[in-house]
Image (tube, grey):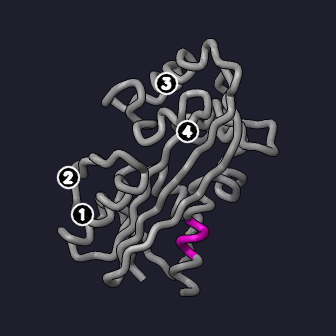
Amino acid sequence: MKLVFATHNANKLKEVKQLLPSSIELLSLTDIGCHEDIAETGTTLHENAYIKARYVRDHYGLNCFADDSGLEIDALDGAPGVISARYAGPQKDNEANIQKVWKELTHKTDKAAQFRTVIALCIDGEEKDFEGIVRGKLIHEKRGEKGFGYDPIFIPDGYTQTFAELGNEVKNKISHRAKATKMFIDHLTYD
């Protein structure tokens, strides 16, 4: 089965490819010749995921899924949430985003947070979404070389290392994206 993942993000593509069964041929936006920047104008992760998946379905006629993920910090009322990648500005600078999170948490004692992913699937006229959450806490130092985004400052519950220290093998089993992707794959395989 051919399925488009509505992303240009090489890190996300690689992460999801490692989780999918070989029976699913995963294509990126680049693979289908979609070079448009699909505007994520939604106010929630669900809305943004569906905007991207529906765009590919409507403009290219292909089965597609898209995701949107965010870091939701308890002490910041769920911020940065839907704007996680652009928290410090439109340039999507990971380092600037981390620095802003640290600044916002300066006088906060609660460091609890969660990563949340929503996957929206548009396939054969059907729409369905899947959500994965991983709880954890933030630290005020960057640790680890693996991962991307906020991974170096997020320690998932039950672990002592950050996502960036745990590496893809562990992260791909326990992450928010892994949980949502497992539900998504189960739906494709068993429904």
Of the residues shown, which amino acid type is indicated by label 4? Answer: Glu
Residue 108, position as x, y percentages in the image? 65, 18
- The numbered mark at residue 72 is 4
Instruction: Find residue 71 and report its image quarter.
Output: top right
Viewer-nearest residue: 150 or 187:
187
Look at the magenta stretch and give its main secondary structure. Answer: helix
Rounded to the nearest whole Å, what is the CA distance between mark 2 and mark 1? 10 Å
Question: Going from the N terminus, do you reach mark 3 or mark 1 first?
Answer: 1
Q: Are marks 4 and 2 in contact (CB under 8 Å)?
A: no
Question: Going from the N terminus, do you reach mark 4 or mark 3 first?
Answer: 4
Rounded to the nearest whole Å, what is the CA distance between mark 4 and mark 2? 28 Å
Residue depth check, mark 4 versus mark 3: number of the one nearer the observer: 4
Rounded to the nearest whole Å, what is the CA distance between mark 3 and mark 1? 30 Å
Q: Vertically, is 83 above or below 59?
A: above
- Residue matched to label 1: 55
Q: Which residues are magenta?
A: 181-185
Residue 132, position as x, y percentages in the image? 59, 57
Name the element at disc 2.
loop
Of the residues shown, which amino acid type is indicated by label 2? Answer: Glu
Residue depth check, mark 2 versus mark 1: number of the one nearer the observer: 1
- Residue matched to label 2: 36
Q: Vertically, is 85 above or below 93?
A: below
For label 1, count other residues whose C-alpha is less than 10 Å away and answer few (under 14), some (14-19) or many (20+).
some
- The numbered mark at residue 95 is 3
- Kindly identify the residue that appears in the image at 47 percent across and 26 percent down: 97
- Kindly identify the residue that appears in the image at 68 percent across and 45 percent down: 135
Q: Are marks 2 and 1 in contact (CB under 8 Å)?
A: yes
On whether residue 183 falls in the magenta region, the answer is yes
Of the residues shown, which amino acid type is indicated by label 3? Answer: Glu
Instruction: Find residue 93 and report its image quarter.
Output: top left
Name the element at disc 4.
strand
Residue 1, position as x, y percentages in the image? 42, 83
